Amino acid sequence: MVAEVLSIGTWSIVFTNLENRGDKKLISAPLPLSPWTIRSWLHAIAYLRNLCAHHSRLWNRRFTITPEVPKEYKPHMEPNTTFRAQAAMLHILMNVIASDFRRQHRLHELFQKHPDVPPGGWALPMIGTKILSGVKFEEGAQLIGADSLTDAATQKSYMIK
């Protein structure tokens, strides 16, 4: 019950201050991350949450509190000072916590609702051939290399770097 009312910032502090390393390992076990990385990511998520809560800009922002980047996620999270790294971090965690969560569909709907905001400007990372954000275009859309996407319907290109 207490867990539901604690803020993410408080959880970050609680996890960081756990003395028993075994407890940190136990908490980290369901996630594909080390306890050290979990600590770093909780701190970065608390910072991101505070930026959002105070209506700060995320686009083209250089994040000062950054997540540690495990080797296997370097292609998706470097540089870790960008929104790209923050989005990748959340995506990785959400795939473990709620893999059926409809965030990809909702983000796609949001970009469709606001066509003047090109999804490429967010510098969202790729995982395999799937855009991390789940943004999909009309049926003729195609990936060009690993750094741009062309919408066949409008012939607009969006950078993904």
Image: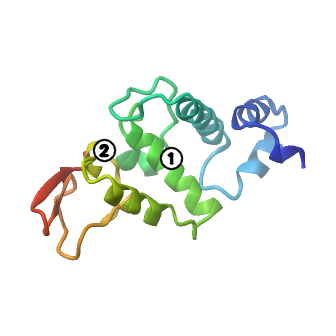
Q: Residue at x 47, y 28 (%)?
A: 56
Q: Position of residue 115 (x, y in %)?
A: 26, 54
Q: Residues within 10 Å of mark 2 (few under 14, many from 20)?
A: many
Element carrying mark 1: helix
Q: Position of residue 149 (x, y in %)?
A: 19, 58
Q: Of label 1 and label 2, which has the lower sequence position?
A: 1
Q: Is residue 112 left or right of residue 5?
A: left
Q: Residue at x 49, y 44 (%)?
A: 70
Q: Is residue 93 left or right of residue 109?
A: right
Please give the count of numbered marks on the rendered protein: 2
Furthest-front residue in this view? 113
Q: Residue at x 13, y 68 (%)?
A: 152
Foreground: 126 or 20? Answer: 126
Residue 36 in sight from this viewpoint: yes
Q: Can you identify the residue that label 1 sits on?
A: 89
Q: Residues within 10 Å of mark 1 (few under 14, many from 20)?
A: many
Residue 133 in sight from this viewpoint: no
Furthest-left residue in this view? 155
Relative to 60, residue 98 above or below:
below
Residue flagged by tag 2: what amino acid is it? Ala
Task: Give the quadrant of residue 47.
Answer: top right
* Front position among marks 1 and 2: 2
Residue flagged by tag 1: what amino acid is it? Met
**What is the spatial separation of the Cα atoms under label 1 and label 2, in whole angstroms?**
14 Å
Q: Can you identify the residue that label 2 sits on?
A: 123
Q: Is residue 3 left or right of residue 96?
A: right
Foreground: 24 or 161? Answer: 161
